[in-house]
Image (tube, grey):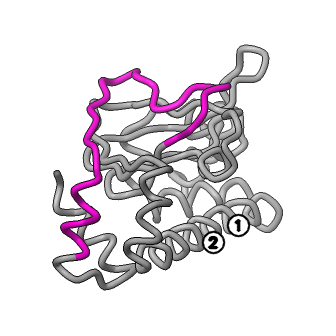
Amino acid sequence: MNDNIKAVLTDFVNLTEEEWLVFSKLFVTKHYKKGDYFLKEKDYCDYVGFVDKGFFNFFYLVKGVHHIRGFFSQNSFISNYPCFLLKNKSKFYIQALDDSTVTLIHRDVLFLLYKQLPKTQELSRKIVENLYLEVSEKYESFFLKTPEERYLNLLASEPKVIEKIPQYMIASYLGLTPEGLSRIKNRIAKK
């Protein structure tokens, strides 16, 4: 298991070594080849994970068209959180864009752990709060920022996203056509 997960979790909640050992024994590691699905539409999402290595995108498939909603990169948490919490079927896909490794914990195990290690509830709450802030910021950006500002923000905050994925995915993520993204990139290059 990658030690990065311990460092990231410790940023949220200070676990003792004993608590960490109890928690980490419940993890399962899974490897995904490029193109494998972490989750498909209409699947249940029983796991929350931590991306040890690799890169994933999540997207809706509407009338055969991929609508990119976001990305999960190394050292980030991965799941369909509403489905994980509510036991609903997924409305979107999560797919590996690289060979990837994810550390997973099953929902039932996590909920039992809440009783055994109360700090895990605090940890989960802080992770979900952090996720909510990220999602809210992205949602607001579609109303408060221009497409060029959204692209520049992505370039500044996630340069690896720009390097790793095809331009049509970046355009979809930003709510643009590939041609619109190309025009933005040309304008920026001229400045």
Q: Residue furthest right?
A: 143
**Gap between marks 1 and 2 measured at Cα:** 5 Å
The reply to whether callout 1 and callout 2 are in contact (CB within 8 Å) is yes
> Hey, what amino acid is under mark 1?
Ser
Q: Quadrant of residue 59?
A: top right
Quadrant showing the C terminus: bottom right
**The magenta stretch spans residue 82:** no
At 67% from the left and 61% from the top, the residue drawn is 138
Q: Quadrant of residue 149?
A: bottom right
At 26% from the left and 50% from the top, the residue drawn is 52
Above or below — where is 104 with respect to 23?
Answer: above
Left-right relation of 36 to 18: right
**Residue 26 image position (x, y, % from top left):** 29, 53
**The magenta stretch spans residue 21:** yes
**Residue 99 image position (x, y, % from top left):** 27, 30
Instruction: In this rendered view, identify the residue nearer to me: 164 or 122.
Output: 122
> Hey, what amino acid is under mark 2?
Leu
Instruction: In this rendered view, identify the residue nearer to me: 153 or 26.
Output: 26
**Residue 184 image position (x, y, % from top left):** 63, 47
**Element at label 1:** helix
At 31% from the left and 43% from the top, the residue drawn is 102
Q: Which residues are magenta?
A: 19-46
| Residue, disc 1 | 136
| Residue, disc 2 | 133
Above or below — where is 57 with respect to 61?
Answer: below
Q: Quadrant of residue 44?
A: top right
Above or below — where is 91 with respect to 154?
Answer: above
**Element at label 2:** helix
**Residue 16 image position (x, y, % from top left):** 22, 83
Around disc 1, counting alpha carbons within 10 Å, would you say few (fewer than 14), some (14 to 19), or many (20 or more)? few
Instruction: In this rendered view, identify the residue nearer to me: 67 or 122.
Output: 122
